[in-house]
Image (cartoon, rainbow, N blue to C red):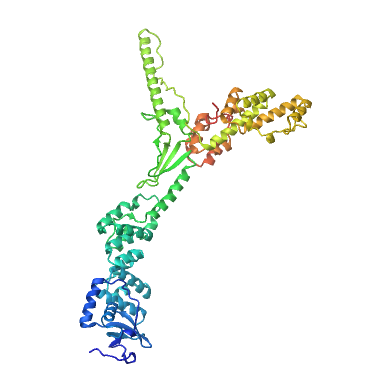
Amino acid sequence: MVETIDKPSDVKKGRLAHVPLTCIVMGSNPRTHFDDQEQFELNATVKALGVMTAVILRDLGDGLYQLVAGERRYHAAKLAFGEDYEIPANIFDMDDMDEAAALVAALVENIARAGMSAAEEARGCAKLLAEFAGDRNEVARHMGLKPEVVARRLALMNASDNVLDALTKRVIKLGHAELLAAAPKAAQDGALAKLLAMPSVPSVETLKEGLIKIARPLATACFDKSECLACPNNSDTQRAMFSEAIDSGNCTNGECFTAKTEVILLETKASLAENYPRVEIVREGDNYSVIKLVVEGPKGVGEDQGKACLGCANFGAAVSAIPGKEGKVYEQQCFDTGCNTRMVAKHSKATAAAAAEAAEASSADSSAAKKGSQPAKKGAKVKPKTKAKASAVSAGVVEFRKKVWRTALRTELQTGARKSIQMLIAICLADSARQIQSSDIDLTPVPGLNGKSVFEAIQAMNKAEGAHISATVASIAFTALDSLDNRHVTDALKAFEVDLAKTFAIDEAYLKLLTKSEITAVAKEVGLETAFGKDFGKLMLGKKDDAIKSLLSVKDFNFHVVPGQLAYQ
């Protein structure tokens, strides 16, 4: 029989007793959600029969008791009978029930009674794990759960608070929560919001199918996957933790997967930059048109054009960022497919013409043989006649070329006053004289000459010697060169028939501007490849700086030769 007490001091600790509701304070209930219908039914039962099962209390002293288990019964009694109602209770001393024991009691009570959600169990397991110094077996023993169930509940703590709350309120199922817990918490909340915004929450299987579609296959990852082995976002790990998980071998943290992939893509691009004039990371939706450079065959551009293409700014490599092909490198690519198409057609036409010429020569040989004449040499190959050139040069070469041209033209103007006068008149006729700044002109050859007054300038030149005036005119022409359009510079070079080789020589400064592909193209064009010898190909497989040093040390080679990419036309 349960003892009834009139006042708190009469409570016998460690025994069943009745305690006024006014003497009870709320404890930390691991259960946070109560089903409204279930509570309504309990309220009705308590009102009719009273509280039949004792709640668990912990003696706090001073006449107060902490509610350890039985919150739903407490609220039902208070609603039915008011605060003066004396509820049956099983009371424990502080010494007999510490915080851990109180938590265990509350959890066991709630687990034993229907209705406690997996999310509430998960939070309770996490609290007990801290109390038992991380010993999962102790948590399982005290809670009366199998160790694998405890492991799954603890894994569920990877879910965000919003997901756990939705599970507690029965808005989603455990399977939904486990699938969402596999993703980063920020992503979980976004996915949950989309689920709840639907007319009805999709099934667990439907959610799984959707997650599989957006998961990233680890088999295609280009980065080191050693860190992924124990990662909670690895579906292999998830399948070991949860009842519901997507297929093995997938990553559910797209943000992490993308970030690691991006590092590898950038590193790969940087490693190829020394080899090719152009390296691009190709992503989904990019409008890059890329085609493999082929020298011979139906899609070939021909041997000479193939050599020229090596130095083209549109020749290079593509690094794939396309899902499923991340990090894959496509080398020897042409990024100017229009030019490639024209060159293939040009080579095809030239090859056909060469074949026709060869057939005609063969026919002539046959006729000559019948007449007893000496036939032409058999086996002579007629090479297609095409003019090879690169469709574009790199930005660095463009700037370098401008300096080469201006240096050559400046040197040419210094060979005679007449050329400086011609240049200055041509500049004026081309409407480029406005680019000349008086502050940049060397006026020292003519004493008293300045830009302040036309009268004073003419007077100063009247007194000056002809050589001094010529020097001043040359200075004005030189000043204009730096800002003169390239087309005017090349016009002047052609008009004066300037030989760039007199002022230019292949050197370290020039070669360092180039990639290994461009260096190869230049070496083939000017004969440096032949001069170096049979190990040229092996040399270009090494470091660029070492290759440059070796090429510039070739003996008896005339480096005063101008590659096509620097020549004016």
Where residue 448 sits: x, y (%)? Answer: 77, 32
Residue 554 in view here: no
Q: Quadrant of residue 340?
A: top left
Give the residue at the far right of this rendering: 463
Q: Quadrant of the N terminus?
A: bottom left
Task: Answer with left or right where residue 43 lies relative to residue 568.
Answer: left
Q: Position of residue 177 (x, y in %)?
A: 30, 62
Examine the rendering and report whether any part of residue 449 can be seen.
yes
Q: Is residue 254 left or right of residue 116?
A: right
Q: Nearer the viewer, residue 256 or 234?
A: 256
- The structure residue drawn at horizontal position 22% and vertical position 81%, both measured from the top left corner, is 47
The answer to which of 241 and 94 lies nearer the viewer is 94
Name the foreground residue: 4 vs 320: 4
In the displayed structure, would residue 558 be above or below residue 71? Answer: above
- Residue 562 vs residue 476: left or right? left
Q: Residue furthest top?
A: 371
| Percent position of residue 266, x then y | 45, 47
Residue 146 location (% of width, % of height): 27, 71
Which part of the image, by quadrant, shows the C terminus? top right
